[in-house]
Amino acid sequence: MNKPFEKLWVSFLDSPRFRDFAGRGIGKSFFESRAYHRLRFAKNQLASSLAALARPDQFRDVKTFCLFVGHNKSGTSMLGSLLDAHPNVILADEIGALDYLAAGFRRDQVFQLLLTGSRRELLKGRVTARRLTPYAYLVPGQWQGRFSRLQVIGDGKAGAATRRFAADPQLWSRLQAALPGVDVKLVQVIRNPFDVISVMMVRGGRTFENATGHYFDACEALAGIRRQAGASLHPVRYEAFVARPAESLARLCRFLGLEPHEGYLRACAAILHDRPDRRRQMVAWTPEWIAVVQGQITKYDFLQGYRFDA
């Protein structure tokens, strides 16, 4: 796509008016329809095939395919944006790479969609949490939306990936077979359950019961994913990352086989708040529901230590 036209197109799709149209009424019905999804897949298949033919060696140095798993609104957009700023990484946001692989897209086609997605997130300013308090994860002077030598490529659509792994116990092995010569690595971002459940209620209009059930159903799926992936999964606690971003990001880079350059680490750390938002304050938690969630937390080793008042 012509770059000036692409910028105008992305600006239109990201405008409040279009987002409002797509989120309700006729617009929502159309964009959630099977016909639209078939059309989008067909368009992406053609576009990614042509791009792969035009640049056949573009992904020859890719060594690692990175997927995020976990709950939505746990910090995956933040980590994905910071990784995307590395000169050897393309990390897209909410592309749904597993959907395309399941549909029969070739490796380079999926990688092309991730590259396009990363570039368009840059054009949108890497803004997230639009329905709560919008925040931009744009890292000045770094490599978001582009690369010097591409070694790691991935997708930050954590919630959908978690559901796909839960629904298909053979997905992990099939994914490795679909990407020969490339290491598949998972990143699980973990955040205080009370914050995540609160966001589910505010954004989705869920009840305590519904949001809590949805959250811990995903935890059960994550427990299985962690067993399958073993050392190929790197857990990141959101609160610890925000407290020590340079140190935490350096560990994540080394897990992915990347050099954590000092200038890159400093630039990423500089854009973050110095403490995590306490989203649990958006909801009137009762002592009874606090006790329910606290009891469920004890069942999962990756949630140990989280409390309502911590």
Image (cartoon, rainbow, N blue to C red):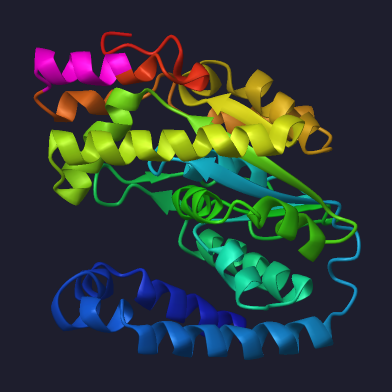
Q: Is residue 22 left or right of residue 140?
A: left
Residue at point 67% right, 78% down? 104
**To which quarter of the image does residue 210 belong?**
top left
Residue at point 30% right, 70% down? 15
Image spot of residue 58 (x, y percent): 85, 70
Magenta stretch holds residue 109:
no
Whether residue 13 is visible here, answered yes or no, is yes
- In the image, residue 236 above or below residue 229: above
Residue at point 64% right, 91% down? 46
Q: Nearer the viewer, residue 166 or 21?
A: 166
Image spot of residue 197 (x, y percent): 27, 33
| Range of residues picked out in magenta | 285-295
- In the image, residue 216 above or below residue 162: above
Quadrant including the C terminus: top left
Q: Name the magenta segment's main secondary structure.
A: helix
Magenta stretch holds residue 293:
yes
Q: Nearer the viewer, residue 104 or 146?
A: 104
Quadrant including the N terminus: bottom right
- Total numbered badges shown on the rendered structure: 0
